[in-house]
Image (cartoon, rainbow, N blue to C red):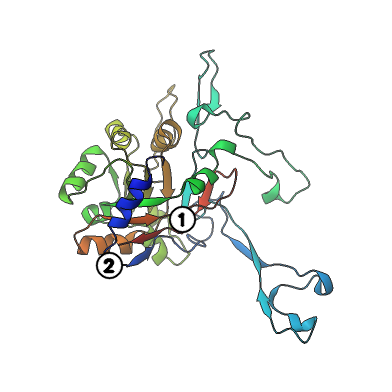
Amino acid sequence: MNWVDRGKVLQGIAEVREGLTFCLSLPLDYPGGTALNPKRQPPRRYATLRDGASAGKQSFCFSYADEDERITDVVCDDTVLMSLQYSTQWDSLAHIGSRFDADGDGEPEAVFYNGYRAGVELQAAREDPEAEPWARYPEPTAHALGIQNLAEHGVQGRGVMLDLHRHFGEAQRRVGYDDLMRVLDADAVEIERGDMVCVHTGYAQLLLDMRKQPQVDLLKRACSALDGHDARLLNWISDSGLACLVADNPAVEAVRVNLQPGIRAPRLPLHEHCLFKNGIHLGELWYLTPLARWLAQHGRTRFLLTAPPLRLPGAAGSPATPIATV
């Protein structure tokens, strides 16, 4: 994302011709439930509690006249408990690391982007056995690789759409280098250094149409996804100069665990290649369908993209509400 500089911001702004905006976020309570990922809980909201003379009352539709009849204000105030990567999200560079023999001593170490080590620069939480189960491990921190760095840098520049759904529909397909090159040629897509690339597969639209009741079996057989096991595709990702890679599916890449006996390898090779090896942020479960349709109808592939994460120090990911402007 260091390649998204002042010049890339100006290139993004130059793509604005109509003044139309598109929200690229799913509602943050989607996909619904935990069927897609049991580790990630949907958000739960609560009214905050009053203090002072009204201590213990909820601060939602609270009338100050209850304390002083001369005051006319009525206030709503709430709080949320949510997984930072439940819905539309950014992965920080702390999201995926790798175990390998970084020291040459024959023992693998857990290492993240730029050589940062688990247990040194990244700190897992200490267990609090007295806490509720969901709160047993408070305040893990990614320090230098936390999502706050992306927020502080700013995420605004030129977005480029790769519309896989336009070519492959909703059929399941692992898209490798050859398929991707055909899509780029057919749609006259040009990607330059510092562009923020968005991959439309139609997955998020299917999810939205399921109205928080995800049909997991159908989703597992639906839509295209990038093939992280294709070495030429991985090389293209880094050689193209793209600043970040975003998709409307849960992992950007097709999740396929097929390890050979005795071979050590990543479960998510595209994640390893982008986050761990090259410092390329990933965005997942973005809602790209309306924007992709509009761009196709108007013979365009580029737009202004504004997509900051939360400035939450130490976090491994963040919800996002990206906006595209055309």
Q: Earlier in the sequence, mark 2 or mark 1?
A: 2
- Height in image: 102 above or below 72? above
Query: Looking at the image, is 105 positioned above or below residue 157?
Result: above
**Label 2 to label 1: alpha-carbon separation:** 26 Å
Give the x, y percent position of residue 128.
75, 43
For the C terminus, the image quarter is bottom left
Amino acid type of the residue that numbered disc 2 sits on in the rendered structure: Glu
In the displayed image of the protein, which residue is found farthest to the right?
53
Q: In the image shown, does 276 or 325 lie closer to the viewer?
A: 325
Direction top: furthest residue: 105
| Quadrant, the N terminus | top left
Q: What residue is shown with label 1?
A: 88
Front in this rendered view, residue 261 or 98: 98
- Counting from the top left corner in percent of width and height, residue 314 is at 60, 43
> What amino acid does circle 1 point to?
Thr
Q: Nearer the viewer, residue 152 or 250?
A: 152
Badge 2 element: loop
Q: Nearer the viewer, mark 2 or mark 1?
A: 2
